[in-house]
Structures are given as C-alpha cells and as structure tokens.
Amino acid sequence: MTEIKKVAVLGAGTMGFGIAGVCANAGCQVLLLDLEKSASEKAKEKLVAGRSPVISDETVLERISTGSFDADLQKIKDCDWICEVVVENVEIKRELFKKVEAVRGEGSIISTNTSGIPLRDIYQGMPERLQQDIAVTHFFNPVHIMKLVELVPGEKTRPEVISTLADFLGQTLNKGVVYAKDTVNFIGNRIGCMWMLSGLHIAEESMAKDDLTIESIDALMSEPVGLPATGLYGLVDLIGLDVMFNVGKNLETNLPDNDAGRAYTNFTKSVQTIFDRGQLGRKTGGGFYKLTRHDDGSKTMEVFDLQNDQWRAAEKPMLSEKDSSLESLYGGESANARFVTDIMTMTLSYSAELVPEIADDIVNVDRAMRWGFGWKKGPFELIDQIGADRVMETIASKGLPIPRMLNLLKQSDSTSFYRDEGKEYFGTDGEWHPVA
Ligand SMILES: NC(=O)c1ccc[n+]([C@@H]2O[C@H](COP(=O)([O-])OP(=O)(O)OC[C@H]3O[C@@H](n4cnc5c(N)ncnc54)[C@H](O)[C@@H]3O)[C@@H](O)[C@H]2O)c1
C-alpha cells in the first residue's frame, strides 16, 4: 500500500490552503501551487494568521513549499497524493488533470475536492491510469475545523486507492471519513442543500400564512432541532446566495428526473430579487441579516423583511417550552410546529429515499450531516428521535409516498433505524449490522 508522505495541493484558495495546512500539521511534506506563486505564498502566510490559525507552530511552515502551475507542476512527480482544489469548473479541472497525468509518478493517487461535480464528468475520456487512481476527497470548510471528508471512488478506481486515502484521512489527518457514491453533491451537500433550498420555499410559505419571521424561523431551525445556531437564513447568509444559486443550477443539471429536490432548484421570487441586486450575504455586507458596527463600538443587527422588501431592526424571538424540542414541535398545531413539521418532513423523507442511491447505508448519511453540517443528529437518528411511525403518518397525511428506507422499516418488525444504544443499524437488506 502507498504510504502518503508527500502531498501536492493544486489550488491555494479557501480550501487548498486549509488542506495544505492540515497535511503539514500531520507531518507531510506539502507542495502548494496556484496560478501565481504569489498566491500560494500568501496562502502559506495566512496559515499562521488569525484567531484560529490552521498552523500554530511556525516551524511546521517549513514543510510547505510554494510555486505556480506553470513553473513548478513537474515537482509533483515524487508526490504520493495530488489533491486538486481549483475553482468549481469541470473544464478547468479536466485541463489541470491532463497536465497532472503527464508528469505524476507511477502509483501516485490523485483526487478532486469538488463539492458536487460528478467525478465521472471529470475523468471521462481520460487515460486508463488516471481513471484507476482518482477519487473525490471532499473536505468541508474550514478544513482544520470540520471533521468530515467524503470519499468517493469512480467506476474504475482501484480499491487500494480508496483504502490508502481512507487510512491517511482517518488516521493521519484525524478526519471522519464517510463513504459516498458518485452522485450529484454526494451526501452532505445533497441533503444539506435540499434542507436549505426547500427551506427557503417552505419558510416563505409559512411567513405568508402565519405569524413567522426570519428570526423565529432561525430560532426554530437551530437548538430545538439540534442544528447549528446560524439556523436557515443565517447559514445561507454565511454561504452566500451566489454559491447557493450555482448549487441550484448544478442540481438542476444533474439530479435524476424524478428527484423531489427538482422542485426547489430555483429561488423564490423574493430571494431571486435580492440575489439579482447583489444582496448575497455576509460577503456583501448583508443578505437576510445586516450587522452594522458603529463608531462608538456598538453594533446593530437588522433583518430583511422579504414581504415588504426593506430592512428593519432584528428581534430576538422567545420560544415557548413547547417549541424547545423536535419531538414536541413535530406534528403540532401551532404555526411554529407546522413550519418545523413541513421542513423536517421534507428533509427526512428525502434522506430516507436516497439510501442506497447516495450511500450504502444510513450510518454514512447520519455521519455526513453530523460531521459536515454540525447537526447533533443525522436524518435517520432524527427519525428515531421523533418516532418512525409519526414521521410516516405525517408523510402519508401530506399525500406523499413513503420513502424507500421507511418502507423497508415498516415491512420489518422494527420501529427504529438504530438499536442497542446505536451499536447496530438497520441495513438496506432489512437486517441489523454493527456500526463500525
Ligand atoms: N469554499 C467551500 O466552502 C468549499 C467546500 C468544499 C469544497 N469546495 C470546493 O473546493 C474547490 C475550491 O474551492 P475554494 O472555495 O477553495 O475556491 P477559491 O476560489 O477560494 O480558490 C480556487 C483557486 O483556484 C484557482 N484558479 C482559478 N482559476 C483557475 C484556473 N483557470 N486554473 C487553475 N486554477 C485556477 C484560484 O487562483 C484559487 O486559488 C472547488 O471545487 C469547490 O467547489 C469548496
């Protein structure tokens, strides 16, 4: 088995600099390249800067050498792993891989950090050797903080490539490896983006019908459900509407024809309006929220009222005891409960339909959402928390078909996806398996 000691990171942007940093921290020699040497130099300097630097021991920087694609690509010839982290553009990635293939050494492993381009679109028509040595290694941002790496083989990828990467990512980099299949957006972004994109639609329907606001929606979509404090709109602000727009376009192109996510690949009219005028999120100084720092050191937070198309002061919503947990909200009569039931039923039933299409088992799906999106519980753990029977009743009451994994559970004599305190999970074969 190849042992990964020398790593080439191709692309020194947000993700490339993080991957270079965690590899150097783990003792690897790292070659960091970008279009210009100055860009990789700057990225290297950034590794020791800020409040939560990727590298805290400056001597680690000595393991990182920098350069440009034009002048230094031949230096990858003695690298064990070559990780491509350039812009999300299939043609640019393919062009780079062609150059990589011409110079890389025999037995080296190559991977792409694409967030959602199917791997086959990157390797199709490429030399056989490349197709056997390539995988997706999908890190999450920020690389040094997020535990998840999704590992995806292509059709011809050698098993040794996957086992070497899994061992390196898990043991050397201390990441949580999830095995995904080569389908659009893999696991985390397929389900996480469905939650966000469908959430933007469902939230606006709820705001139009009921007395809900962006702040109350975010309050519900955080602690009570076990999701991060950013909630729904806060997370979209953090990611940026430009990124979400491209995610929607990629889904539109690559989702299977009958996929439930197809209904949500476009923004709602009001979200499209703020996107069109460049109100993208934190990166443009405001999206759904806007934080203003005043000269006297004080701060004010405003929220964008989508119905009236204007900013107003943000309020801190008070949630009642009944609104404090998913079990008590789910299926309830209040406006808050109806919203939580609608959005979570959509996401949970979508997840239950996608196994085994996107992953071999429910454990990989749950881990992807916990390690990549910071959810306290993954979708199948949430179904167990609510009660699979209650979720199925709600799905049926909405006139929707019972999704694959819930149907399988219904046909068995089990009522939950995990048993024995999470030590065993319910498989796609209807049998119980130990959680690895
Ligand atoms: N940012 C995220 O949250 C995130 C998370 C997971 C995966 N990804 C994926 O990682 C990859 C890199 O994303 P990023 O956020 O680091 O992007 P980025 O824009 O920060 O960096 C991209 C790098 O690509 C280089 N580049 C631009 N045009 C190029 C070209 N024509 N040829 C070669 N290099 C070129 C740029 O100089 C830049 O350093 C993408 O595939 C993205 O989808 C991003």
Image (cartoon, rainbow, N blue to C red):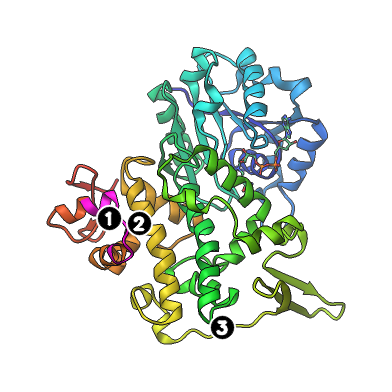
Look at the image and tell me in which quarter the C terminus lies: top left
Pinpoint residue 263: horizontal percent, then vertical percent.
Answer: 48, 52
Which image quarter: residue 306?
bottom right
In this picture, residue 64 sits left or right of residue 212: right
Q: Can you tell which mark lies on residue 282?
A: none
Q: Quadrant of ligand 1?
A: top right
Q: Are marks 2 and 1 in contact (CB under 8 Å)?
A: yes
What residue lies at 50% left-to-right and 16% top-to-bottom? 107
Mark 2 Cα within 10 Å, few/some/many (few <14, many 20+)?
Answer: many
* Residue at point 43%, 35% (across, down): 166
Q: Quadrant of residue 122?
A: top right
User: Marks 3 and 1: which is nearer the front?
Assistant: 1
Q: Amino acid at mark 1?
A: Ile
Give, as a single range, the part of the protein colored magenta: 396-407
Is 68 inside the magenta-drawn segment? no
Residue, disc 3: 317
Say which element carries label 1: loop
Q: Which residue is mark 1?
A: 402
The correct choice, above or below, for 4 with respect to 239 in the image is above
Disc 3 residue type? Pro
